Amino acid sequence: MAESDQPLTREEVAHVAKLALLDLSDDEIDLFTVQLGNVIATAQAMNDLDLGEAAPTHHPLGLTNVFRADEVRPSLDRSEVLDQAPAVEGDRFMVPPALGED
């Protein structure tokens, strides 16, 4: 793609970088101008596709539920588990406060 064909100018990339408080080198601005221009050109090419005959879809592949059925099964004994905890309050684990809160 020739420089004049780029959908984005070097000045626009530098301006957006400045707004985002990014300190980009000249080489980075040149690189990102090409890369972002390619992204924009690809998005434009996607917008230009004639999809009038395509059936709407939420996913390109058929999906099926791969999870097992939710069934009640025996689990660990609560008192046995709590007996092994370093600290317990009532019938719950006692843990240190989050973020140093009291």
Image (cartoon, grey):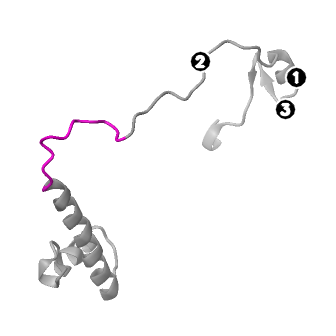
Image location of residue 98, percent across then percent down: 63, 39
Q: Is residue 77 left or right of residue 1?
A: right
Image point (11%, 82%), residue name: 4
Q: Which residues are magenta?
A: 48-60
Question: For the C terminus, which image quadrant?
Answer: top right
As drawn, 46 above or below 67: below
Image location of residue 18, percent across then percent down: 26, 74
Residue identifier under label 1: 83
Q: Is residue 30 left or right of residue 45?
A: right
Q: Name, please, the residue furthest toward the front.
A: 53
Q: Name, please, the residue furthest toward the bottom.
A: 26
As drawn, 54 above or below 82: below
Give the overall secondary structure of the magenta segment. Answer: loop
As drawn, 47 above or below 22: above
Residue identifier under label 3: 86
Image point (33%, 73%), residue name: 22
Question: For the N terminus, which image quadrant?
Answer: bottom left
Question: SS of the residue at dot 2?
Answer: loop
Image point (72%, 14%), residue name: 73
- The kind of residue tagged 1 is Asp
Residue identifier under label 2: 69
Image point (66%, 36%), residue name: 97
> Which label's residue is closer to the chain start, 1 or 2?
2
Question: SS of the residue at dot 3?
Answer: loop
